[in-house]
Amino acid sequence: MIKKKNESRIMHSFSIVATIFVLVTTSVLGNSTQLSSTFYDTTCPNVTSIIRGVVEQAQRNDTRVGAKLIRLHFHDCFVNGCDGSILLDNADGIESEKDAIRNKGAEGYDIVAGIKTALENFCPGVVSCADILALVSQILVSENGGPTWEVQLGRRDGRTANRTGADRDIPTPQDNLKLITEKFRNKGLDSTDLVALSGAHTFGRAKCRFFVDRLYNFSGTSKPDPTIDVEYMKTLRQTCSQGGKPSTLTNLDQATPDAFDNYYYKNLQNNRGLLQTDQELFSTSSIDTVSIVNRFANNQSDFFDTFAQSMIKLGNIRPLTGSAGEIRADCKRVN
Ligand code: HEM
Ligand SMILES: *[C@@H]1O[C@H](CO)[C@@H](O)[C@H](O)[C@H]1NC(C)=O
Ligand SMILES: *[C@@H]1O[C@H](CO)[C@@H](O)[C@H](O)[C@H]1NC(C)=O
Ligand SMILES: *[C@@H]1O[C@H](CO)[C@@H](O)[C@H](O)[C@H]1NC(C)=O
Ligand SMILES: *[C@@H]1O[C@H](CO)[C@@H](O)[C@H](O)[C@H]1NC(C)=O
Ligand SMILES: *[C@@H]1O[C@H](CO)[C@@H](O)[C@H](O)[C@H]1NC(C)=O
């Protein structure tokens, strides 16, 4: 009897100590954004090879897999932090971000679902959808010729979406450089991050509707943008005729469309940037972005190193950690 009492007292004080420990660690770790590259080392040690297996299969059929998924990661992180919110479908209390104007035409959701299914088979309930986006971005950048980096992990998935936030915070090609810079600064990203991350337009495609005004009616002048390289203008007009299909796709980097390299910056130096917001990084008399474009155009390793650092900063935007949020079983809906 006495022994039992003692035991339960010991257990009781142990649980108080344990509770205090949990409270202290979550208040320390939960508030700061403590992610770690070793987060799944014991709980899902081959998370990387499982994801690689799925995307290598998908890439055989679609060279744009990397472009699609890194764009989803970017659009996820800019809305309520990197919490997988972009992946949620409409439901009770969820206004899907997929329906935001800024996300119209975003693709790759089915590939994320395939990755999630594979991961749930090996380590159920462990890897968050937000981490899938961060990790698969690194895997595919590197497989397309770009840098590798240690992806920080441990994000948890949000239980809400924010459609109006998506339309407010995600940049559009119509924004001027000042506004783009502000949108990045609001997320803790500086001009170097802006120029480096824009380098993701080294692969993937864009629809005519995002730049056709530059070809025929620049800033409402009924004339083309006079600064576009003449040959490039000809090529673009062939792809995107006036009044033609706005959904026709063209390469964001016409020099090396599917390779992750620094031609994006060389294109800008040659007035061959596709989107207005791409070209402005070089053509606006803004000392800081122009010199960064030149740096990256002249030195691909410099671009790769900086891109890796900026991706880590992007992935660190307000993640949910500790016991916040959840690990979704299906990326399309909350548990
Ligand atoms: C700086 C402001 C940015 C603007 C205004 C912008 C805008 C756009 C637009 C309009 C498209 C074409 C979408 C379509 O045709 O459906 C696009 C594609 C793309 N964007 Fe951006 N973007 C920006 C920054 C970024 C960043 C920071 C990343 C990643 C780190 C990124 C990655 C991509 C990729 C990879 C594609 C091609 C996607 C595909 O092929 O499906 N963009 N972007
Ligand atoms: C993951 O690890 C387990 C156990 O170590 C192994 O059986 C399995 O084949 C691995 N899967 C992949 C895709 O590497
Ligand atoms: C290949 O891609 C096409 C179009 O994106 C899709 O319809 C088809 O199901 C894919 N095939 C495989 C084997 O993934
Ligand atoms: C949605 O995003 C907007 C714009 O960033 C923000 O002001 C708002 O607080 C967010 N709403 C929710 C419910 O998180
Ligand atoms: C050019 O754009 C302006 C303003 O966006 C518009 O008012 C005008 O009708 C357009 N002109 C042509 C020829 O499409
Ligand atoms: C290019 O960048 C790398 C990495 O930042 C740096 O170590 C190297 O010195 C640079 N090379 C030149 C020629 O500036």
Image: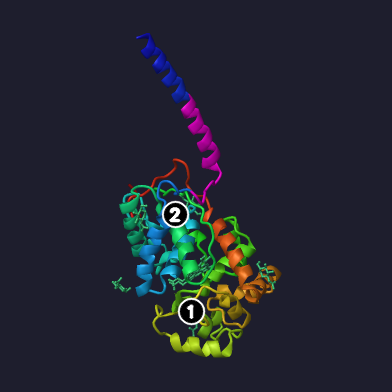
Q: Position of residue 209 (x, y in %)?
A: 45, 77
Q: How many marks?
A: 2
Which residue is tagged 1? 257
Q: Are marks 2 and 1 in contact (CB under 8 Å)?
A: no
The residue that appears at 62% across and 66% down in the rendered structure is 178
Q: Which residues are magenta?
A: 17-38
Disc 2 packing (10 Å; few <14; some 14–19; many ≥20): many
Q: Answer whether residue 298 is visible to the viewer in this image.
A: yes
Instruction: Please check the rendered image and state whether residue 30 is part of the magenta-colored stretch, yes or no.
Output: yes
The residue that appears at 47% across and 56% down in the rendered structure is 165
Quadrant in which the N terminus is drawn:
top left
Under circle 1, the secondary element is: loop
Residue 198, by quadrant, is: bottom right
The residue that appears at 55% across and 81% down in the rendered structure is 218
Which residue is tagged 2? 131
Q: Is residue 292 above or below residue 130?
A: below
Q: Is residue 49 above or below residue 20?
A: below
Q: Position of residue 95 (x, y in %)?
A: 37, 55
Q: Position of residue 23 (x, y in %)?
A: 50, 32
Instruction: Please check the rendered image and state whether residue 133 is part of the magenta-colored stretch, yes or no.
Output: no
Q: Is residue 306 above or below residue 94?
A: below
User: What amino acid type should be assigned to the residue bearing mark 2?
Assistant: Asp
Q: CA distance from mark 2 to mark 1?
A: 27 Å
**Extreme residue in the top direction:** 2
Of marks 2 and 1, which one's residue comes earlier in the chain? 2
Q: 39 or 325: nearer the eye?
A: 39
By secondary structure, the bulk of the magenta-drawn segment is best described as helix
